[in-house]
């Protein structure tokens, strides 16, 4: 812009400027620590509370969020970190995640991102415009892991509802016994597995053998769970045996009452828990390929009788999903991000989070550095339209930062940091999350405008 044009633009009457130095009121957010617990609290109420009790700032500009936090407990947490966390995670009435906050005239303004448009038009007052595109934000392969509660099979009772479920088959491990379905003694579902020893023996053995290709990987599903009961003819001593594809076995001995009452058992397994098991060649046991599960119920001496197994399944696998974008990968290479969110309790919920994150992160972070003729009405947090033919720009941007200053010639100018980012849409992740009202935790969000 020429000197003459700048002079014309300044013919709005006498202008006087005062140089000030000091701390922004936002410094009040760093000076106090919070030790407090919030239960089932709406986001803006948390912000109001910490402002009222830990800062001199007023909260008249704090707008209501559409997010309730099930439980937030802080110990010596800076006010800044709490307000920032709520701003980064709360959603508005349009189901879009993200709030801005700033200090203005002694009040803290807290409002949904991009809600307010600037009253200032940049047409004709742009002095300098620099466009930046940074790929730091780009992630085009997103792994999302939820709570470690995924069972196998998903129907925890499927393996004891049939003698030949899709993953394997039941049999007796002794020549003196037989297995059958029993609808009378079951504890879960319609049936349980009954093993009956009809000729005196030292023990009864029920065996579940996985079909080829269906062997269980206990490093991924590191717990085995089941319910068992036995008649009084048994001693109450039971041995659980896992056998791998090479015939190696790992055993766990335990006791139950022989009073014909169901007992639920759960044992951790897999390579991380190998030292909790005994067996032949345990050091070489293949925890990734378990072929058989054997239940041995021991008699006191020899005897006959029946015992039952129900509700057999493996568990403690994390729910998970992966989302990726091939177009972004071809442009920027494979860039990965892993998110662990303990509130996700289904693969579908993980897939929704992965998809939402991918849409937000697959493209670079776009920003503008713009210098314009000074205008004090330009404030952070609002949106403003930018038209720059040289840069091919004609779009709305969010004002992330504003710096008013005097140049070397005494002219009042304003420097703006503007960002363009896709909205982060809050997904309805699962029935559990909707009922509890918790938010995505463990996710890295973009910078706040302030």
Image: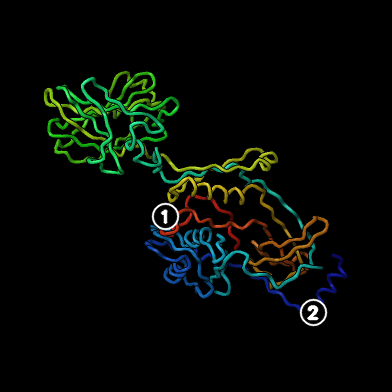
Say whether residue 300 is left or right of residue 146.
left
Query: Where is mark 2, residue-wise?
Result: 12
Instruction: Looking at the picture, tell me which residue is in the foreground, 178 or 125.
Output: 178
Determine if residue 183 is in view.
yes
Q: Residue at x 47, y 65 (%)?
A: 43
Determine if residue 30 is in view.
no
Percent coordinates x, y for residue 444 in the rendering: 53, 50
Percent coordinates x, y for residue 330 in the rendering: 69, 39
Instruction: Looking at the picture, tell me which residue is in the foreground, 163 or 22.
Output: 163
Query: Where is mark 1, residue-wise?
Result: 432
Query: N-terminal of the two: label 1 or label 2?
Result: 2
Q: Secondary structure at mark 2?
A: loop
Q: Secondary structure at mark 1?
A: helix
Colouring: rainbow
Residue 251 vertical position relative to residue 46 in the rendered view, above or below: above
Kindly indicate the quadrant of the structure image that contains residue 170.
top left
Say whether residue 88 is left or right of residue 304.
right
Percent coordinates x, y for residue 263 in the rendering: 22, 40
Disc 1 from disc 2: Cα separation = 60 Å
Residue 430 vertical position relative to residue 321 in the rendered view, above or below: below
Instruction: Looking at the picture, tell me which residue is in the foreground, 200 or 333.
Output: 200
Quarter of the image with the N terminus is: bottom right
């Amino acid at each position: 812009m020429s000197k003459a044009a700048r002079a014309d633009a300044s013919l709005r009457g006498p202008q006087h400027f005062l140089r000030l130095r000091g701390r922004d009121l936002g410094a009040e957010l760093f000076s106090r620590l919070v030790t407090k617990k919030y239960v089932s609290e709406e986001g803006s109420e948390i912000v109001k509370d910490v402002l009222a009790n830990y800062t001199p700032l007023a909260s008249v500009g704090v707008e209501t969020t559409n997010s309730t936090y099930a439980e937030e407990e802080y110990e010596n947490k800076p006010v800044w970190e709490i307000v920032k966390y709520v701003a980064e995670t709360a959603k508005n009435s349009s189901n879009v995640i993200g709030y801005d906050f700033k200090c203005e005239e002694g009040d803290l303004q807290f409002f949904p991102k991009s809600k307010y448009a600037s009253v200032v038009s940049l047409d004709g007052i742009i002095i300098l415009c620099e466009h930046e595109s940074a790929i730091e934000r780009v992630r085009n392969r997103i792994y999302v892991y939820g709570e470690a509660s995924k069972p196998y099979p998903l129907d925890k009772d499927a393996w004891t509802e049939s003698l030949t479920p899709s993953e394997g088959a039941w049999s007796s491990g002794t020549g003196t016994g037989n297995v059958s379905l029993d609808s009378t003694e079951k504890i879960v579902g319609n049936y349980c597995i009954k093993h009956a020893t009809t000729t005196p023996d030292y023990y009864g053995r029920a065996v579940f053998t996985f079909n080829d290709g269906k062997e269980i990987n206990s490093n991924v599903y590191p717990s085995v769970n089941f319910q068992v009961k036995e008649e009084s003819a048994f001693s109450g001593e039971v041995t659980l045996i896992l056998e791998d594809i090479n015939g190696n076995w790992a055993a766990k001995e335990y006791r139950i009452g022989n009073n014909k009452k169901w007992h639920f058992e759960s044992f951790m397994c897999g390579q991380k828990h190998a030292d909790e098991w005994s067996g032949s060649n345990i050091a070489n046991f293949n925890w990734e390929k378990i072929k058989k599960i054997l239940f041995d119920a021991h008699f006191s001496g020899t005897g006959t009788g029946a015992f039952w197994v129900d509700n057999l399944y493996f568990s403690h696998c994390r729910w998970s999903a992966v989302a990726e974008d091939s177009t972004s990968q071809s442009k920027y290479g494979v860039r990965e991000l892993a998110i662990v969110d303990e509130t996700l309790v289904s693969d579908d919920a993980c897939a929704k989070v992965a998809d939402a994150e991918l849409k937000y992160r697959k493209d670079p972070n776009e920003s503008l550095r713009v210098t314009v003729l000074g205008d004090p009405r330009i404030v952070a947090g609002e949106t403003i339209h930018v038209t720059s033919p040289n840069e091919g720009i004609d779009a709305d941007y969010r004002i992330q930062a504003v710096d008013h200053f005097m140049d070397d010639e005494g002219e009042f100018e304003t420097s703006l940091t503007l960002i363009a980012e896709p909205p982060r849409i809050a997904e309805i992740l699962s029935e559990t999350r909707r009922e509890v009202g918790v938010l995505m935790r463990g996710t890295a969000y973009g910078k706040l405008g302030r």
